[in-house]
Image (spheres, rainbow, N blue to C red):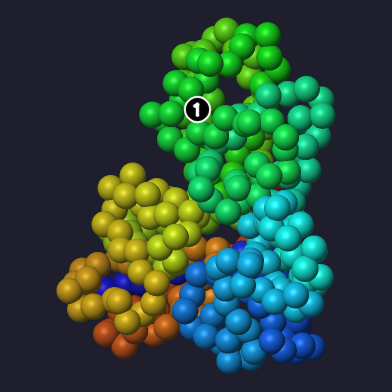
Amino acid sequence: MEIRVADRVGFCPGVRRAFDLALHALSREKPVYFLGELVHNPQAIKMLEEKGGIMVTDHEDIPPFSLVVTRSHGLEKKTEEFLENHQVKIIDTTCPRVKRVQILAQELEKKGYRLVILGNPQHPEIRALLSFISQEAVVLDKKENWGRLKDLSPSEKIAVIEQTTFPREMKEQFIREGKDLFPHLNLEIFDTLCAETEMRQKDLVENIQLYGVNKVVVVGGKNSSNTRALFLTAQNWGVESLWIEKAEELEEKHWNKEDKILVVSGTSTPQFSVEEIIEKLKAKGAFFHERKDTNGGHNRENKCGEVHSI
Ligand code: SF4
């Protein structure tokens, strides 16, 4: 059995920044409330709780005058207003890339565009984005919903933007087929995908093509969109894929000695979760391929503040 690890694993810059801000807040004040899962990892959440963090899912559970850390996905406007009205101090960890999409959407709206958003309407990032615009945007999460564009008028200027973690392949399919299906519509396509998630998907495909990987272990939360995109990408390439959150879920039945395994991770999975899995496979006799990248590191976690343009 051989194992390789994707070049980009562990936290992405946006989640790294959120986590660092959370630790800094906990070093100054206790308790600190966390509105929603800051990261999709039970061990990392436990660590925050041990340092004085209190996890809540409903903003109404946060007492007045307390301190709250929000998530990198952004905060809905009405939630922000509720917290401000209750004198809650907010540490807003919205990822700068997510923020830029919110600002772009507002600017496009001011310029008179009708917005079409490729993304999941229930995802916190999209819910936050929708709360900052006044129009009812059309949100399309899958091909089956593209037909909803038929209700738009040919006289409207239509801007298409995406959830930062929307799969690139689906966006390209939309551009190809959407314009054919609705040639009368005046669609302008903007690129708001996060480079980080794209690079992880590209890296996965390169590893499959270059090294004959036959099995992919995807590490990340079951409710993480970008982890799902990795899992689906591996499946689309016909490679057996296993989606797990932690090393304990990996069992003997999941591998055999001929396997060439690639380990990849979602953007809110800590580096240590990936390392635990590598150690478990190494302990079973797997040969581990060290992978050097062009930045002189290997299998590194991305550094805080490393922001690419949208
Ligand atoms: S995946 Fe991209 S947009 Fe989302 S938090 Fe990470 S860096 Fe920001």
30 or 64: which is nearer to us? 64
Residue 17, placed above or below residue 114:
below
The residue at the point 57 percent across, 73 percent down is 56
Residue 133, how many percent across, how many down?
72, 38
| 129 with respect to 29 (left or right) | left
| 81 with respect to 213 (left or right) | right
* Residue that lies at the very extreme toward the bottom in this rendered image: 50
Residue 59, how many percent across, how many down?
63, 66
Residue receiving disc 1? 174
Residue 116, placed above or below residue 54:
above
223 or 171: which is nearer to us? 223
Q: Quadrant of residue 110?
A: top right
Residue 181, placed above or below residue 107:
above
Residue 213, how many percent across, how many down?
33, 59
- Categorize mark 1 by other alpha carbons within 10 Å: few (<14), some (14-19), many (20+): some
Residue 196, placed above or below residue 116:
below
20 or 304: which is nearer to us? 20
> What secondary structure is marked by label 1?
helix
Q: Amino acid at mark 1?
A: Phe
- On the rendered image, what quadrant is the C terminus found in? top right
Q: Is residue 23 visible?
A: no
The residue at the point 31 percent across, 88 percent down is 283
Q: Is residue 172 visible?
A: yes
Residue 85, how many percent across, how many down?
80, 63
Q: Quadrant of residue 130?
A: top right
The residue at the point 54 percent across, 75 percent down is 270
- On the rendered image, what quadrant is the N terminus found in? bottom left
The residue at the point 38 percent across, 29 percent down is 144
Q: Is mark 1 within 8 Å of ligand 1?
A: no
Number of numbered discs visible in the structure rendering: 1
